[in-house]
Amino acid sequence: LQRVQDMVAFVTGAGSGIGRATAIRLAQEGAKVCLADLKENRADEVKQQIESFGGQAIVADVDVSDPKRMEDAIRQTFDQWKRLDIVFANAGINGTLTPIENMSEQDWDRTLTTNLKGTFLAVKCAIPHMKQNGGSIVITSSINGSRKFSGFGSSAYSASKAGQVAFAKMAALELARYKIRVNVICPGAIETNIGENTKKTPELKNIEIPVQYPQGSQPLEHGAGKPEQVADLVLFLASGESSHISGTEIFIDGAESLL
Ligand code: NAD
């Protein structure tokens, strides 16, 4: 028996990194997956990969901060397979890394809107389709939103990630009556493309202070983790194996946040 057999999953940021690895892992274990991302081409590649081993996937071109697109994509997923069991609210950006005194409102808004509002919208739009049968929602925060505040210039990112943790806990409490579980994962450094679109301003050097350990180093792995390792955690939280787990925040960082 597959671990999420015949379940339907909606995954944001599915074209790259953690979202991509998780979408593939869920499909390997029997889920039908909607791949939501900005970059339709990369989600298309993931769809092809899933179909190559006999899995089922559809692609949705979604900006997670756009309520209409989010609502349409989640409805499309439900209409396609007549159910929705799993939501992985994962799309996110580092945004612009800069000191607070140099951060523009636009940069602040872009990070908060993508990471925090995008999470709210995914959860809100999923509720009508999940409340009948229950399900599992997993939100990707970060150790930088909960246990480790050492990313210089990432005040907006950290604030958005901390907001996701608080939101997940309130959602777990509220949605328990529909048998919808909500959990939040806090990865440490993971080898993905997230750095590619990160902008750093020159003023960043003004707030960097020497640290005692090499940044990004993880005691367990002596380096960054892999998206596939995060995918295994999300699979567990999505499946019935975690049926009594809700409102929990799980660190997946090779003990990085303890340094
Ligand atoms: P990634 O850049 O490889 O993938 C993120 C995906 O999200 C991309 O495909 C991108 O197109 C998509 N995306 C970005 N903005 C979007 C929007 N507005 N609408 C729809 N899709 C959008 O990065 P990743 O590392 O896989 O990031 C996934 C999540 O993991 C993020 O929430 C990130 O904050 C979190 N995270 C990552 C790390 C890490 O070290 N990589 C650590 C902690 C947390």
Image: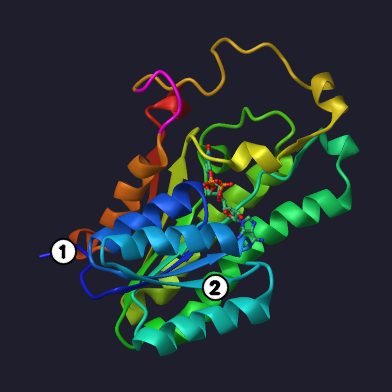
User: What range is drawn magenta here?
Assistant: 221-225
Query: Is residue 155 covered in magenta?
Result: no
Q: With respect to residue 60, does 141 lie above or below?
A: above
Q: Which mark is residue 104?
A: none
Q: Please provide percent x and percent y for residue 101.
A: 89, 36
- Label 1 SS: loop
Tell whether position 223 is magenta. yes
Is label 1 in contact with label 2 (beta carbons under 8 Å)?
no
**Could you classify mark 2 by the number of other residues whose Cα lies within 10 Å: few (under 14), some (14-19), or many (20 or more)?**
many
Q: Of 218 and 168, which appears nearest the observer? A: 218
**Residue 132: quadrant of the picture:** bottom left
Looking at numbered disc 1 in the image, what kind of residue is underneath it? Gln
Residue that numbered label 1 is attached to: 2
**Does residue 41 lie above or below 217 as drawn?**
below
Residue extending farthest to the left is 1
Residue that appears at 62% across and 27% down: 150
